[in-house]
Image (spheres, rainbow, N blue to C red):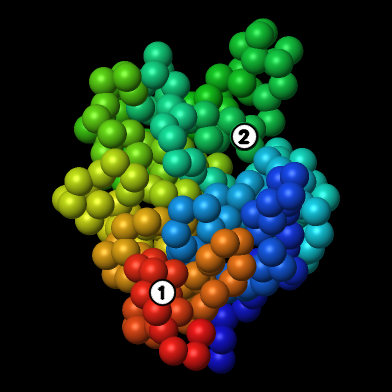
Amino acid sequence: MSAEVLLQVRELCKCFGGLEAVKNVSFEVRVGQIKALIGPNGAGKTTIFNLLTGVLPADRGSAVFRGRELLRLPTHQIAALGVGRTFQTSLLFDHMTVLENVMVGYHLRGRTNMLRAALRTPGVNAEERDYREAAMRVLVQAGLEALADVPAAALPIGQRRLVEVARALAAQPTLLLMDEPAAGLNMRETERMGELIQRVRDDGVTVLLVEHDMSLVMGISDEILVLDHGERLAEGAPAQIRNDPRVLAAYLGEETNGC
């Protein structure tokens, strides 16, 4: 029996002026999947992430997550429902340590308001200790515990990417959207990122992945959706996508018969 649908996207559309960046895209993400969105530059992948997380308003369509329509909600409510995200560019707080950066993710779910934080009440101090302990557990999961006290500004790109994933996990998402997590990484760092993504899935977090590194995508994905010029081109298991002539044409500009 197939796993239950966690996210159902239907007829999603977004235009920028006269440009249709996303054209009637539909897909599903099932519980426990690593699902990848791939396609040439300008295919609409990051735009879809921005629509699903409330960064951009959709023109039309639907995105239902655990029975809730996401497209009518602001970003912070979408995050509170259990949708996390990492970004293409590094967004760490360089003046903070690795541990403190990960603790930021826990503050998204905290109970402390500004007045209680300013007064440093006993409840605030206890909550802060809980965040610190939980953040250390996430760093252990990511293999970063030795860097807990290192300033983020001192980290190379590969470690920064891993810290960003750890911070996203600290918010305890049910679905994690990862936008090009291997961008700028070397081969070993990419392998390590792939191992972390698989551990994340094995620990109960469903992953929706945008990535250009095809060796990573093919190695860890359960299912792949291919976009081209904002439209759904193909969808299936990695072996099926690897041999699809429409996908080869989109990536390589090859002429294919019957397409």
> Dot 1: few (<14), some (14–19), or many (≥20) neighbours within 10 Å?
few
- Left or right: where 251 falls relative to 112: left
Which amino acid, by three-letter code, is at mark 1? Ala
Which amino acid, by three-letter code, is at mark 2? Leu
Q: Which residue is mark 2?
A: 108
| Residue 2 at x, y percent in the picture | 56, 86
Image vertical order of residue 174 relative to residue 56, above or below: below
At a point 74% along the width and 50% down the height, the residue shown is 18
Mark sitting earlier along the chain (2/1): 2
Residue toward you, 147 or 236? 236
> Dot 2: few (<14), some (14–19), or many (≥20) neighbours within 10 Å?
some
Image vertical order of residue 83 relative to residue 235, above or below: above
In space, the residues marked 2 and 1 are separated at their CA atoms by 43 Å
For the question of whether residue 9 can be seen, the reply is no
Badge number at residue 86: none
Residue toward you, 129 or 189? 189
| Residue 125 at x, y percent in the picture | 56, 19
Image vertical order of residue 258 relative to residue 236, above or below: below
- Left or right: where 11 falls relative to 226: right
| Label 1 residue SS | helix
**Contact (CB < 8 A) between labels 2 and 1?**
no
For the question of whether residue 229 can be seen, the reply is yes
| Label 2 residue SS | loop
| Residue 93 at x, y percent in the picture | 44, 21
Can you tell which quarter of the image residue 239 is in?
Answer: bottom left
Can you tell which quarter of the image residue 14 is in?
Answer: bottom right
| Residue 158 at x, y percent in the picture | 26, 39
At a point 68% along the width and 25% down the height, the residue shown is 112
Q: Which residue is mark 1?
A: 249
Q: Quadrant of the N terminus?
A: bottom right
